[in-house]
Image (cartoon, helix red, strand yellow):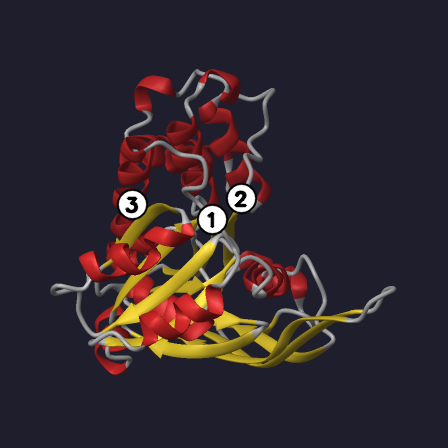
Amino acid sequence: MIVEIEALTKIYESKQRVVAVDGLDLELKQGEIFGLLGPNGAGKTTTISIATTRALPTSGTVRIAGIDVVRYPAHARQLIGVVPQFNTLDRSLSVYENLYFHCRYFGFSHAQAKARSLELLAQFMLTERKDAFPAQLSGGLAQRVQIARAIAHRPTVLFLDEPSAGLDPQSRMAMWSAVEALRSEGITVLLTTHYMEEADSLSDRLAIIDYGRVLALGSPEKLKQTFGVHTIFNLKLKSPEGLETLLATLKALPEVIGAEATADGLRVIANNSDGLLPQLVQAAAGYGLRDLTTIEPSLEAVFIQLTGRDLRE
């Protein structure tokens, strides 16, 4: 295994003790794209911060290609590339210079750094923008430059922390293509994301975590099969009164296997949606039904079943 995370724990001691990561165990195979999913506060970013030497664990170990990242952080940094949630390109350097000086920092000669930078510009379709500065780039182009820079020194593992956050759909698709292309280079990718479609499309395997623990692990298809994916209805209501009665009514409907209150209404889980929608509308009509959305059997439905929350909650 190229990445080994064993019994990883991170506790923040302040006015209130917070367990951000709680005995996490994960293994990543060489060359795979691995998705790490969880609602806000689940421990994703903390796990990546420790794995990339930006934070120290309370206990447990992380090894990259056999190198303990806590004991040998300088060595570990040679093996990893990182694309954080925010744009960290040097604004005073051009696109080409951002790549060139990154290579030089990692010990490339002038000729090697120049050749590698030009290679990456072509690979990520950035050649025409090589003299542009970060402030002149769209969010999608800037993210492609960040990914190109992160792999410029040919790392073993690339960490992508919410790489498509804030991107428009077209830029997101371009970013996906760039990440998928890394398979041919044998780079292992650990990806955190708020987009279920992204995780489903890109990940060979993924882990769903919450409260710093792994709830499920496997390929997207395996998880959908294992957890018997259901249809989920989200009802937004004006009136919060009398929901216990409504919940009891909904739970008694055929095909409904569960119902619970949410921040702005109710969530109903059903075996299927056949003929159920009008019954839900009729039952909730007296409670000021404002909106009703349906999540068909999907990875998102698995996530909600396991965590009881939407991905962004």
User: In screen coordinates, is 216 left or right of 57?
Assistant: left
Residue 2 visible in this rendered orientation of the protein? no
Q: In which quarter of the image is residue 116?
A: top left
Cα distance, mark 3 to mark 2?
15 Å
Give the labeled residue for mark 1.
162
* Residue 122 percent across, percent down from the top left: 28, 31
Residue that badge 2 annotates = 85
Element type at marker 2? Answer: loop
Residue at the spot x=40%, y=47% of the render? Answer: 288
| Earlier-in-chain disc, 3 versus 2 | 2
* Image position of 187 with respect to 290: above or below: below
* Alpha carbon separation for disc pair 1 and 3: 12 Å
- The amino acid type found where label 1 is placed reads Glu
Q: Nearer the viewer, residue 172 or 103?
A: 172
Question: Is residue 221 shown above or below 284?
Answer: below
Name the quadrant containing residue 206.
Answer: bottom left
Read off the residue under disc 3.
Answer: 176
